[in-house]
Amino acid sequence: MKIAVAMSGGIDSTIAAILLREMGHDIIGITANFKTGIPADRNNPFFSEKSIEDSRAIAKQFDFPHFVKEISDDFYHLVIDPFCREYMNGRTPNPCTHCNPLIKFKNLLEYALTLGCEKIATGHYSQIKISGKGRYFISRGKDPVKDQSYFLYRLSQYTLERVLFPLGDFLKSEVRDMALKRNLSIAHGPESQEICFIPDNNYSEFIGKMMGTEPPPGNIVDREGNILGRHKGIHNYTIGQRRGLGIAAPHPLYVIRINAGDNTITAGFSEELETEGLVAGDINYMKATSMDDIDILVKTRSTQQPVPAHLIQDGERVRATFVEKQKGISPGQAAVFYDNDGGVLGGGIIEKGFNAG
């Protein structure tokens, strides 16, 4: 089978390509070029120019063709600009959940098909399965720490039918061992990061550069509206944040609400972060075609262990009521719903958390 492998130059995509090659498949490598409009930083090991160079060298070493796909414009308009605008509006987006269906598994897949490939493979630590009803779905990978199913919940049936995840049934330690046995210099390379285009994790500086402006300072208030202090722009804060508030208080204070309308941050105590459930919209169905009145497991952050909840369909939205209250429910983040076997039923974008009354 002729298979394209989306390559970043890192250990995961490299081993994915090598495994498929050793299985006898006809492999080509594709690396995305998305550097236009992004502040260049050669010290970032995932900067696209370095990714292209490293991927090209790997393809040459293992004797398979390598191509570069220009995606700069789409990457800016579909991923970076919405990311920045969400933060400017007081929400906390996850760009990876949008990049995967709109860029990696769309632009690169379409390009792979034009090159005569039947499928595209990546180094994601997740698995693809087929339900008894014939629906393709993502399932959690073997490695519970590296599992990336959360980021893939928006993939379509069309895409899933044409994707391979060669590393889904391996632990990260096993993948590093494979690289060592093959004497690859990247065996001890750095881990890829969640947001590849912000290497230093300085969101506010990046957003200011990309948007040409920053949200102004404003008030930090309590639930009653009493002014507690001043914030440095709402894009510097996320729900649940404790550090950086600059408020002297007898007990730790956390960000419990961000209001872009009046440019305020509401601070409160830890227990004020607790919510009984969430409302999510922009729903994508994967293993399920309906999520009404079912018990599920839900993740509201990529690093969270799934927690039990009950789903009710509410028009084009779903309401998830947790079995136990949860903290840090952030509008703009993804809520991904799983069954007990780790299969992704679907997911959506969190609009708000709620409590009874």
Image (cartoon, rainbow, N blue to C red):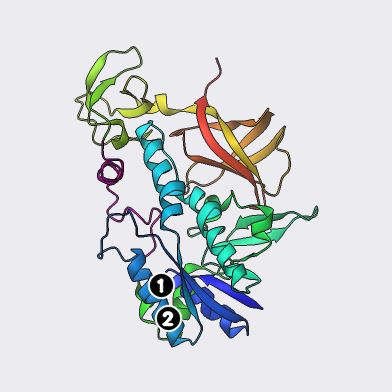
Pinpoint residue 34: horizontal percent, then vertical percent. Answer: 39, 60
Q: Say if the magenta span includes residue 194.
A: yes
Q: Residue at x 23, y 35 (%)?
A: 244
Q: Give left or right: position of 331 versus 101.
A: left
- As shown in the figure, which amino acid type bears the numbered disc 1? Gly
Tag 1: Cα neighbours inside 10 Å, few (<14), some, or many (≥20)? many
Pinpoint residue 128: horizontal percent, then vertical percent. Answer: 65, 61
**What secondary structure predominates along the stretch shown in magenta?**
loop
Q: Nearer the viewer, residue 174 or 105?
A: 105
Residue 83 seen in the current view: yes
Badge 1 element: loop
Q: Tell me the distance, in whole angstroms, between the alpha carbons under discs 1 and 2.
A: 7 Å
Marks 2 and 1: in contact by CB < 8 Å?
Answer: yes
Labels in figure, total: 2
Q: Quadrant of the N terminus?
A: bottom right
Magenta span covers which residues? 190-213
Badge 2 element: helix
In the rendered image, which residue does mark 2 sit on?
Answer: 58
Tag 2: Cα neighbours inside 10 Å, few (<14), some, or many (≥20)? many
Q: Residue at x 47, y 39 (%)?
A: 333
- As shown in the figure, which amino acid type bears the numbered disc 2? Ile
Q: Quadrant of the C terminus?
A: top right
Q: Say if the magenta span includes residue 178.
A: no
Residue 92 placement: quadrant: top left
Q: Residue at x 65, y 40 (%)?
A: 296
Q: Give left or right: position of 254 versus 160.
A: left
In the rendered image, which residue does mark 1 sit on?
Answer: 9
